């Protein structure tokens, strides 16, 4: 989608920057989400970015909950850094199209949107739990709809990779319901760190390579 909008952002591993695009200065700023930051700086200078979907880059996933939450919290705080430092520039930029500005605005505001929806979900959960005999059909219906979405996602993955059987698909469909809520804890932690102006983070330790990356 970002390729179509003309605002593809660097993310994850496997980033390549043309040397001539750097113009002799350090392309990174001070945001904890450095990849999104430097690609945004390029877009503001009317330089092209592109996501190459045909390239495969392997990276090690996190197998423990606490490191996962810390990692996502660091990235979320980096998004808040970019919101403060670049959102006005994005809105006023003549080099970035209107639709791209809308997408980038949504991305930068996503932590606040997630906080609002997360709080709403918590309040609804408490309310429904209190009147569970009356509202249990709604709970079952929502869980069924959510499970259907997850099942469709996993079915597409299985079709592309041939790596999942029906048992694994049902298993992952179930744990994805809880996995999504881990992001809420990361967002709360990121906002807490941002308010307290704590910008020093210990980077994620990858067990497989035995060093910090």
Image (tube, rainbow, N blue to C red):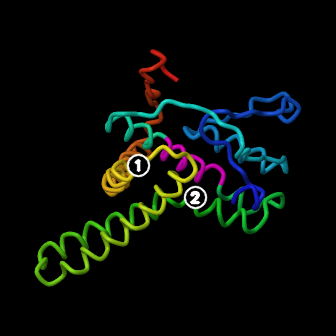
66 and 136: which one is in front? Answer: 136
Residue shown at 60% from the left, 48% from the top: 82
Give the image location of residue 25, x and y in percent. Answer: 80, 29
Mark toward the viewer: 2 or 1: 1
Q: Residues within 10 Å of mark 1 (few under 14, many from 20)?
A: few
40 and 53: which one is in front? Answer: 53
Give the image location of residue 8, x and y in percent. Answer: 72, 51
Left or right of 141 in this view: 134:
left
Q: Residues within 10 Å of mark 2 (few under 14, many from 20)?
A: few
Secondary structure predominantly adopted by residues drawn in magenta: helix
Q: Secondary structure at mark 2?
A: helix
Residue extending furthest bottom?
Answer: 134
Left or right of 211 in this view: 17:
right
- Split into 4 quadrants, where in the image is the N terminus? bottom right
Give the image location of residue 130, x and y in percent. Answer: 11, 75
Residue shown at 12% from the left, 79% from the top: 131
Stretch of the chain drawn in magenta: 75-86
Q: Please name the residue that numbered disc 2 is placed on.
A: 107
Q: Specify the quadrant of the image occupied by residue 128.
A: bottom left
Note whether 67 is above or below 4 in the view shown. above
Q: Secondary structure at mark 1?
A: loop
Residue shown at 18% from the left, 78% from the top: 136
Q: Please name the residue that numbered disc 1 is placed on.
A: 165
């Amino acid at each position: 989608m970002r390729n179509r909008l003309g605002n593809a952002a660097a993310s994850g591993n496997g980033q390549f920057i043309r040397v001539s695009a750097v113009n002799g200065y350090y392309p990174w700023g001070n945001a904890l989400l450095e990849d999104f930051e430097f690609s945004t700086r390029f877009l503001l200078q009317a330089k092209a970015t592109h996501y190459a979907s045909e390239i495969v880059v392997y990276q090690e996933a996190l197998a423990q909950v606490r490191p996962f939450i810390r990692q996502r919290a660091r990235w979320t705080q980096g998004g808040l850094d970019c919101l403060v430092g670049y959102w006005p520039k994005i809105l006023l930029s003549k080099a970035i199209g209107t639709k791209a500005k809308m997408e980038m605005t949504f991305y930068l505001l996503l932590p606040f949107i997630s906080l609002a929806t997360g709080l709403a979900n918590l309040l609804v959960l408490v309310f429904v739990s209190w009147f569970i005999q009356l509202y249990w059909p709604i709970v079952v219906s929502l869980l069924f709809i959510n499970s259907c979405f997850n099942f469709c996602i996993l079915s597409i993955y299985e079709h592309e990779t041939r790596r999942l059987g029906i048992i694994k698909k049902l298993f992952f469909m179930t744990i994805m319901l809880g996995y999504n809520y881990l992001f809420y804890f990361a967002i709360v932690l990121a906002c807490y760190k941002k308010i307290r102006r704590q910008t020093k983070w210990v980077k994620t330790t990858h067990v497989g390579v035995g060093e910090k990356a």
